[in-house]
Amino acid sequence: MVQTLRDQLPSSGSGGRGWVPPGTLPDPRPPDEADVVVVGGGVLGWSVAYWLKVLEGQRRHGMKVLVVERDPMYSRASTVLSAGGIRQQFSLRENIQMSRFSASFLRDINEHLGVPNEPPIDIQFQPSGYLFLASPQQAAALEATVQLQREEGAQVALLSPTQLKMKFPWMNTEDVAVASYGLEDEGWFDPWTLLNAFRRKAISLGVQSCSGEVRAFVISANHMMPPGQLSARIKYVHVHMPDSIEYQPVACAIVVNAAGAWAGKLLEAEGLPRALCRPPLPIQPRKRYVFTWHCPNGPGLSCPFLVDTSGAYFRRDGFAGNYLGGMSPPEEEEPDPSDLSVDHDYFQEQIWPRLAQRVPAFESLRVGGSWAGYYDYNTFDQNGVLGPHPRLENMFLAAGFSGHGLQHAPAAGRAVAELLVKGRYETLDLRRLGWDRLVDGEPLKEQGVV
């Protein structure tokens, strides 16, 4: 249960695609104290904050929740730079369950995130199934995955090459052995609208936010633990102000690490002894490109969110023959993540040939724009890490989803909030996504990372 902080007041210390609507700009400085500090104001961080306020109920003294975001204009945020997809087609049971929860949440989004006297939320959802293509070597694994998805209640069809050609005559199916096609609760939507809806609703419920970067912690060691089991509690986070040498210490009872691609780096911050952070959190930024193109003779309105046997993907982008897509590179060819510059040769040399092989009409496409964004990539098993840190007693993790954090944010945010408020998972049992698997060296591999 989250404890309030009436007696822990610190002394003062010193030392593009985003757009922020009026009324939701973060406060210029953080408060002196908060019950819960959420580090990271992406969609997952705001989901945690929202669910904390929902689950606390009608308490006389509501918990103080603070969201700290270092990029208030969201110009480099993974959320708003994503392709915006949601799908049920995963190979890990927990991921399927989170997708099903999130699909239901998005269907009723105005019941959850609507704010009185404000316009209804329209996430511009485009219903269209994901279509995964499998080569003969990939066919058995895909069929087994579809069986698992059906067990979890997902509506997914298996299509033979003949059925595939009949449904999508614009496609070259020569090297395809089987395909899986989502029949409901799949498609894409506007990521910024979902992020902003979580923000506005959370703020309306009393969540505070500020611009700044958490660069240091003050801890108190737990000397009652047996030798070799060192642990500590975080007493303060130091929030450094933008474009300033000043910082504000914030006393806190709980810290939620929702720092996305920088969640691993956060555990290297000043004040955290290295011995407390072993094994290291295997989350790092991985740069991914998204390209847009125009092809008037392309697939048209029937175009699914297609994931090719080669790993290349594309979907329709609005109407009038516009598309977007990309492809994750091999491990040995990962681009430098130090900036968000785009390698245009990657499209010309790697993606376009694969697209044209699958969709002959794309041989004559005309390249449009492009951008790059970050995956919060879990190098261990490409799945999210949720729940308590093993040695930092009051830190909880919510990061590492490796490209599917946007679509799982409603479910993952509620799960973490349940741990904080109720002390256990109630809606979905996500214990396997905890830190133990990192310690034990037992990965939960997700085969459906795009």
Image (tube, rainbow, N blue to C red):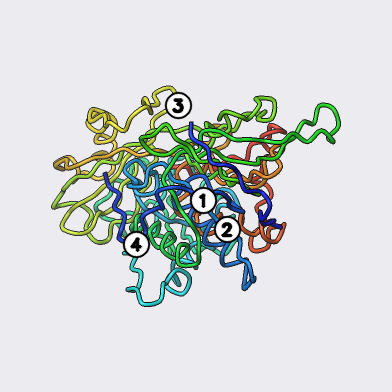
Q: Position of residue 449 (x, y in %)?
A: 47, 42
Query: Between residues 74 and 60, which one lies in front from this camera angle?
Result: 60
Q: Answer with left or right where residue 86 lies relative to residue 437.
A: left
Q: Amino acid at mark 4?
A: Gly
Q: Which mark is residue 23?
A: 4
Q: Which mark is residue 31?
A: 1
Asked if disc 2 and disc 4 are in contact, CB closer than 8 Å, the reply is: no
Q: Disc 3 or disc 2, which is closer to the eye?
A: 2
Q: Amino acid at mark 3?
A: Glu
| Residue highlighted by disc 2 | 64
C-alpha distance separating marks 2 and 4: 19 Å
Asked if disc 1 and disc 2 are in contact, CB closer than 8 Å, the reply is: yes
Secondary-structure class at tag 1: loop
For marks 2 and 4 on the same chain, the one whose residue lies earlier in the sequence: 4
Secondary-structure class at tag 4: loop
Q: Disc 4 or disc 1, which is closer to the eye?
A: 1
Query: Between residues 50 and 58, which one lies in front from this camera angle?
Result: 58
Q: Amino acid at mark 2?
A: Lys
Q: Position of residue 185 (x, y in %)?
A: 44, 64
| Residue highlighted by disc 3 | 331
Q: Quadrant of residue 417?
A: bottom right
Q: Disc 3 or disc 4, which is closer to the eye?
A: 4
Q: Position of residue 292 (x, y in %)?
A: 22, 44
C-alpha distance separating marks 1 and 2: 10 Å
Secondary-structure class at tag 3: helix
For marks 3 and 2 on the same chain, the one whose residue lies earlier in the sequence: 2
